[in-house]
Amino acid sequence: MTADNFIIREVRVDDIEALLALWRATESGPSVTDTPQHLSMLVEKAPDLFLAAEADGRIVGSVLGGWDLWRGHIYRLAVHPDVQRRGLARRLVSEIEVRLRARGATRIYALALPRDAALAFWQTQPYTESEDVALVRTFES
């Protein structure tokens, strides 16, 4: 299965338990704010910035974009271990970047866990380390 075989779509409320399970499987959460109530609020308030990757009816990836009317942020990039190294993380990042840029982002900050696999992925992307946050990508306007 390649990255083209995955469906990238907006998260729905009925995906929340599967997302929490994904984050546990990837050791990327959940954190104190990752509750069904908080995630439902995200689905309601910014559905276009909360994405899931689906394969065979199963949630296998996620990414969350944040927009503060000035900068874009990427959080919760996760790909299930069963489907890693197939280009899915790259597809998720690309899709959330398109959506953040459509809102006006010329700079996007990526919050990455300090784990070897996460850092190795981000080092293959056009992001650079920043003094104030881990990884930053700036776009020319």
Image (cartoon, helix red, strand yellow):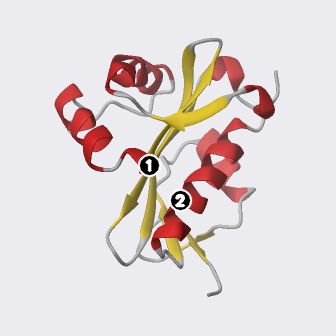
At 38% from the left and 29% from the top, the residue drawn is 12
Q: Quick check: 55 above or below 122?
A: above
Q: Is residue 97 left or right of residue 51?
A: right
First reached walking from the N terminus: tag 1 or tag 2: 1
At 71% from the left and 67% from the top, the residue drawn is 126
- In percent of width and height, residue 18 lies at 42, 17
Question: Counting other residues with Cα less than 10 Å from the Cα at mark 2, is it few (<14), some (14-19), or many (20 or more)?
Answer: some
At 60% from the left and 44% from the top, the residue drawn is 118
Q: Amino acid at mark 1?
A: Asp
Q: Quick check: 92 above or below 55?
A: below
Q: Is residue 1 left or right of residue 137?
A: right
Asked if the residues shown at circle 1 and circle 2 are in contact, with their CB atoms under 8 angstroms apart, the answer is yes
**In the structure shown, which secondary structural element does the residue marked by tag 1 occupy?**
helix
Quadrant of the drawing holding the N terminus:
top right
- In percent of width and height, residue 3 lies at 77, 33
Q: Nearer the viewer, residue 26 or 66?
A: 66
Q: Is residue 58 left or right of residue 15?
A: right
Q: Nearer the viewer, residue 118 or 62?
A: 62
At 58% from the left and 12% from the top, the residue drawn is 57
Residue 135 shows up from this direction: no
- In percent of width and height, residue 14 lies at 35, 19
Q: Identify the mark at residue 68; answer none if there is no mark.
A: none
Quadrant of the drawing holding the C terminus:
bottom right
- In percent of width and height, residue 90 lies at 70, 47
For label 1, the residue is 48
What count of labels does the image hold?
2
For label 2, the residue is 99
Q: How much space separates mark 1 and mark 2, taking CA atoms? A: 7 Å
**In the structure shown, which secondary structural element does the residue marked by tag 2 occupy?**
helix
Q: Quick check: 90 above or below 7?
A: below
